[in-house]
Image: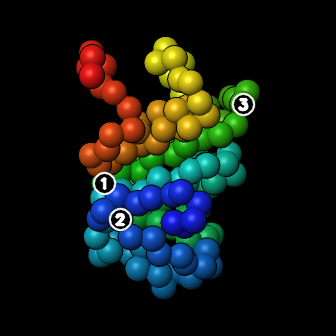
Amino acid sequence: LEQTGVSFHEQARLIETDPSDFFAPIASGSFQHQGMVVAPCSMNTLAAISSGITDNLIHRSADVCLKEKRSLILLARETPLSLIHLKNMTRAAKAGAVILPPSPGFYTRPATIDDLVDSVVARVLDHLNVDHALSKRWGDAS
């Protein structure tokens, strides 16, 4: 990832796991972590999570986050939204998930695509209480 210009938070760890591996640590409530982000979150994945269907590791891990009252952030990627999508989002939100569509704020007058991406990533990191310098805070003149 270093060659791609992607950098990680100093405390971050990247662990790749097979989606069918239900013995992965993240499939258990005893695995300690700050939260989970599903990005992008398809309407299929949103529907499974909101319904409690756990037929792959993403769905199971999200279910664990909800039952353990840990942060679960879903970057829902569909547009336009149907009533079914909205009901699934509502059900997931009522269960404790944060629905965070990857919609950047254009009021900051972004100059590049990276600025647009950073604004969304900054919102995700804020919800996980991870310090970052990706964007200015509202009212911050610096």
Residue 98 lies left or right of residue 80; in this view the side is left
Image vertical order of residue 15 relative to residue 36, above or below: below
Which amino acid, mark 3?
Answer: Thr
User: At x 39% / y 38%, what residue is drawn?
Assistant: 134
The residue lying toward the viewer, choosing from 26 and 107, is 107
Circle 3 residue: 79
- Lower position in the chain sequence, tag 3 or tag 1: 1
- Lower position in the chain sequence, tag 2 or tag 3: 2
Which amino acid, mark 2?
Answer: Ala
Residue farthest along the bottom direction in this orientation: 23
- Lower position in the chain sequence, tag 2 or tag 1: 2
Element type at mark 3? loop
Element type at mark 2? loop
Label 2 vs label 1, nearer the camera = 2
Q: Position of residue 126 (x, y in %)?
A: 33, 40
Q: Label 1 near label 2: C-beta < 8 Å?
A: no
Residue 68 seen in render: no
Q: Label 1 near label 3: C-beta < 8 Å?
A: no
User: At x 29% / y 65%, what residue is drawn?
Assistant: 11
User: At x 61% / y 34%, what residue is drawn?
Assistant: 113
Circle 2 residue: 12
Circle 1 residue: 69
Q: Position of residue 118 (x, y in %)?
A: 48, 38
Residue 34 lies left or right of residue 38; in this view the side is left
Image vertical order of residue 11 relative to residue 110, above or below: below
